[in-house]
């Protein structure tokens, strides 16, 4: 039991410790709670009522199953109150409490307005009265806020619940519908706005924090996938297998444009997917399926899947089909974003981002995609006229496709799986209607096979280890653990990943004018039978490399020694894995910073061998 003195030990949540303040003349709440041994787990200020206090109870007086602060006493302006968030008790008031636990004559109990009592015509005409009626009609809404502080409500709709932001169009429509059914008229705009303001305050200050997920979630070592249907079905995947259920133990958010996945069917095979994807040889197939398995993980990092090929190699179709397997949407693929804000909005509304027909990636987008693939926070203004910021910290699977070599920057190529699609013979082409009809026919069994493999991966990942950890080590560990459930030979992923990374390194260095110039310089030193080492300042190196007019003519060629140093640092990892090491400047004689470039006989390429125990 927490009483009197002990109550002063409790803080007010994130606002710090709350010193006990004597309430205004009226009810002595602390003495009342102490007398009846009503245990309080937390005492805090009532943010929406100045000077008010909330005493969260360990157990509801009416139902012992309602625990962990779901029931609470309130005190504002000396007036006591009681509330419980559960449907069975939401109509209980302080009058019911006093019937069970009478107050002392010395305890002044002020009369609170009864929500069920009819109001006068004058009261009914006031906007505040409609706001009170809307609040009363929404007593069965479960309010909460996300870790980012966004207020949400979970409202009953038919035989299920739906989750909306408090200010969203969906929640407003639900409130208006409830009011019309009760009073046969729509609420006034002012009353509606007042009620929404109260709901926002209660969700933020007086309601629990809850994580909200889009499409895929994790809870108690299980993966949950929202099928997106009207019945709110989800797939639960554990080490023991998978099942379809209603009412998962996590909250999913539905966004505009989301489409439903079909219910999976057991008995299929992952090989049923291969005829629909034009990925070419076995190594590409292994990497694409490994990417699929990783995209169903609730936690990143995720490699960026880049599909390249000539016109007619089914790049867009492959991207659409892969997204349709995980996160179907009205727009399967989209044009690239114009700025960070567009990328943030897309990532907050979808699980998979697929960008189509890119002819190049500007530096800002390359950096943003790297951040989105491996983790990092984004922030932007909530509205163009607001000073408040909106924060988004999440990781998302990304698909890019285009004809050109898209991973021109080494940091993007370092996080990518680059799949070069072969051309399709005219005799092997299918029209889209036929292709999608056949794909939708087999999709339930393909999903069943993928979910079975995910269950096997969950069972085996703890017993899987990598001899050496490559870039994106979490992805490599997951893909290695998935080899057996997918029917791949041991080491198939490591071999495919190693080969793919070698090609990515070679393509990126050749596409970068600085990287190509350094490779040419080292080859020239070898041909001249000179030492395989070069020393000098960045200024000396820039002059040496610019002796070749080809590099100097490139638009991206560095204009200063400092610019060259920055470019070399970006390329250092790929150059080293190609056998060329760069030792960056330290102060030498007369303050000169000398860098050293030398070649080793052995390339230290990409990935390492992996093994499963």
Image (cartoon, rainbow, N blue to C red):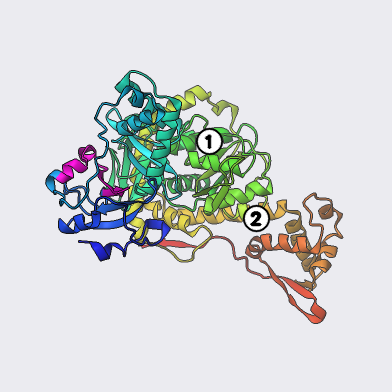
**Crowding at label 1, few (<14), some or many (≥20) Cα neighbours within 10 Å?**
some
Out of 3 and 245, give the one closest to the viewer. 3
Out of 557 and 164, give the one closest to the viewer. 164
Mark number for residue 318?
Answer: 1
Q: Is the residue 45 above or below the residue 212 in the image?
A: below
**Crowding at label 2, few (<14), some or many (≥20) Cα neighbours within 10 Å?**
many
Specify the segment rendered in magenta: 73-98
Is 441 on the left or on the right of 247, as rendered?
right
Mark number for residue 260?
Answer: none
Q: Determine the CA span between mark 2 and mark 1.
A: 25 Å
Residue 421, image x, y percentages: 58, 40
Residue at mark 2: 410
Q: Earlier in the sequence, mark 2 or mark 1?
A: 1
Instruction: Based on the picture, tell me whether residue 408 belongs to the magenta stretch.
Output: no
Instruction: Based on the picture, tell me whether residue 89 belongs to the magenta stretch.
Output: yes
The quarter in which the C terminus is drawn is bottom left
Residue 17 seen in the figure: yes
Residue 128, image x, y percentages: 39, 31
Name the element at disc 1.
helix
Is 150 on the left or on the right of 411, as rendered?
left
Question: Which residue reaches farthest bottom?
Answer: 589
Residue 492, image x, y percentages: 46, 53
Give the image quarter of residue 515: bottom right
- Going 33% across and 44% down the picture, which residue do you hit? 250
Residue 113, image x, y percentages: 27, 36
Is 360 on the left or on the right of 388, as rendered?
right
Give the image quarter of residue 309: top right
């Amino acid at each position: 039991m927490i009483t009197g003195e002990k109550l002063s030990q409790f803080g007010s949540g994130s606002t710090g410790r709350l010193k006990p303040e004597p309430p205004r003349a009226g009810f002595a709440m602390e003495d009342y709670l102490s007398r009846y041994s009503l245990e309080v787990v937390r005492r805090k200020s009532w943010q929406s009522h100045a000077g008010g206090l909330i005493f969260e109870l360990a157990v509801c007086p009416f139902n012992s199953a309602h625990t962990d602060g779901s029931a609470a006493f309130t005190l504002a302006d000396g007036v006591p109150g009681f509330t419980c968030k559960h449907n069975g008790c939401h109509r209980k008031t302080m009058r019911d409490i006093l019937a069970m636990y009478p107050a002392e004559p010395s305890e002044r109990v002020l009369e609170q307005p009864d929500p069920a009592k009819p109001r006068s015509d004058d009261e009914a005409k006031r906007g505040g009265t409609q706001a009170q009626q809307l609040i009363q009609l929404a007593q069965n809404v479960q309010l909460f806020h996300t870790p980012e502080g966004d207020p949400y409500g979970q409202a009953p709709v038919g035989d299920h619940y739906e989750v909306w932001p408090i200010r969203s169009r969906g929640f407003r429509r639900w409130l208006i519908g409830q009011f019309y059914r009760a009073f046969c008229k729509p609420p006034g705009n002012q009353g509606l706005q007042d009620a929404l303001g109260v709901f926002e305050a209660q969700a933020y200050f007086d309601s629990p924090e809850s994580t909200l997920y889009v499409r895929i979630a994790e809870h108690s070592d299980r993966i949950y996938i929202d099928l997106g249907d009207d019945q709110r079905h989800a797939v639960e995947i554990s080490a023991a297998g998978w099942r379809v259920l209603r009412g998962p133990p996590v909250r999913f958010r539905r966004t505009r444009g989301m489409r439903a996945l079909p219910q999976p069917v057991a008995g299929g095979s992952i090989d049923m997917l291969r005829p629909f994807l034009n990925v070419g040889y076995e190594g590409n197939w292994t990497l694409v399926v490994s990417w699929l398995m990783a995209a169903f993980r609730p936690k990143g990092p995720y490699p960026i899947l880049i599909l390249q090929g000539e016109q007619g190699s089914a790049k867009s179709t492959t991207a659409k089909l892969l997204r349709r397997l995980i996160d179907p949407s009205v727009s399967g693929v989209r044009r690239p974003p114009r700025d960070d804000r567009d990328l943030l909005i897309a990532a907050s509304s979808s699980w998979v981002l697929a960008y189509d027909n890119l002819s190049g990636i500007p530096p800002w987008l390359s950096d943003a995609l790297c951040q989105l693939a491996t983790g990092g926070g984004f922030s932007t203004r909530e509205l163009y006229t607001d000073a408040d910021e909106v924060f988004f910290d999440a990781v998302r699977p990304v698909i890019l496709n285009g004809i050109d070599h898209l991973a021109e920057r080494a940091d993007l190529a370092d996080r990518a799986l680059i799949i070069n699609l072969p051309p399709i013979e005219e005799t092997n082409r299918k029209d889209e209607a036929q292709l999608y009809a056949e794909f939708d026919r087999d999709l339930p069994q393909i999903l069943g096979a993928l979910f079975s493999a995910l269950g096997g991966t969950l069972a085996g990942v703890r017993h899987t280890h990598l001899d050496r950890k490559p870039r994106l080590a979490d992805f490599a560990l997951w893909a290695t653990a998935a080899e057996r459930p997918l029917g791949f030979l041991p080491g198939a992923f490591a071999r495919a990943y190693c080969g793919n990374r070698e090609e990515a390194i070679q393509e990126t260095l050749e596409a970068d004018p600085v990287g190509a110039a350094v490779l040419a310089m080292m080859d020239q030193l070898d041909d001249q039978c000179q030492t395989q080492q070069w020393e000098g300042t960045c200024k000396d190196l820039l002059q040496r490399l610019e002796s070749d007019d080809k590099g100097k003519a490139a638009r991206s060629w560095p204009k200063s020694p400092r610019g060259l140093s920055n470019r070399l640092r970006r390329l250092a990892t790929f150059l080293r894995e190609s056998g060329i090491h760069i030792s960056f400047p330290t102060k030498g004689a007369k303050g000169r910073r000398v860098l050293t470039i030398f070649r080793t006989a052995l390339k230290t390429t990409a990935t390492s061998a992996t093994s499963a125990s």
